[in-house]
Image (tube, rainbow, N blue to C red):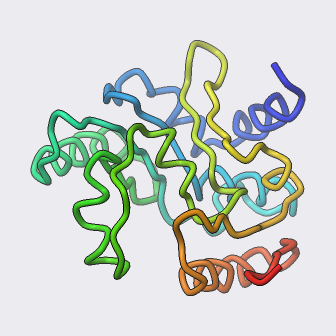
Amino acid sequence: MPKLQMELQAIISKSPLLQTVLDRWDRVALPDVRLVAGAIAQTVWNHAFGFAHDHGINDIDIVYFDDNDLSESTEADHSARIRGLFRDLPVWIDVKNQARVHIWYKEKFGYSITPYTSTDDAITTFPTTAAAVGIRAVGNELDLCAPYGLSDLLAPLVRANKKQITREIYEKKIARWSTLWPDLEIIAWDQ
């Protein structure tokens, strides 16, 4: 296992929040499913800056890919089941089918996107390079998707991933993050 991946796995293993999710991973039981984005990045930042493991973490994002069922009701059923599985955790569990994101994206963000082809494809569009990461438990190890590597995440440094987001989305995220993690190195949109 590469050194940076070992470092990430060690940090995650010390987080009661994320480790609880990974300990029950086999019960999530969704196709092409990953724990992604903010909760992973924020756990790393909390570790780096000496904060409590759950400081600033409002939710845990679990994404899956099922292009055979794009119904909102099925996604809602999966969400309710998985929230029940993690009802003892003090955060919101957000479950989204990445195969249906293109259906609602324009209404929420004002512009259309091309449908994703997999969960890992969706991760390539996440707003920052540090949070463009997804994991799943496979035995005692993590299966990792980090299309931009782990260097920014572990630095910790925040840089826009301009593949899909707008400047406004990025600046909204970094405004919140810089308040909660004031020592984050943040690269401005224009750099």
* Viewer-closest of 50 and 59: 59
Residue 52 spot, x, y in % from top left: 73, 59
Residue at image x 58%, y 63%?
163
| Residue sitting at the far top | 139
Q: Is residue 21 above or below residue 80?
A: above
Which corner quadrant holds the N terminus? top right
Above or below, comparing residue 60 to residue 10 in the picture: below
How many tags in the picture? 0
Question: What residue lies at 87% left-to-right and 72% top-to-bottom?
Answer: 185
- Expressed as whole percent of the image width and height from the top left, the position of residue 115 reads 33, 51
Q: Is residue 5 above or below residue 38?
A: above
The quarter of the displayed image where residue 45 is located? bottom right
State the residue in front, 75 or 20.
75
Q: Residue at x 37, y 78 (%)?
A: 109
Q: Nearer the viewer, residue 1 or 81?
A: 1
For residue 161, side relative to residue 74 (left or right): right
Which of the image's four quarters has the C terminus? bottom right
Q: Is residue 90 left or right of residue 54?
A: left
**From the viewer's perspective, is residue 177 above or below residue 58?**
below
Instruction: Name the residue at 57% across, 50% down.
Output: 124
Position of 43 with respect to 101 (left or right) is: right
Q: Residue 49: horizontal and vertical position, in percent?
A: 87, 63
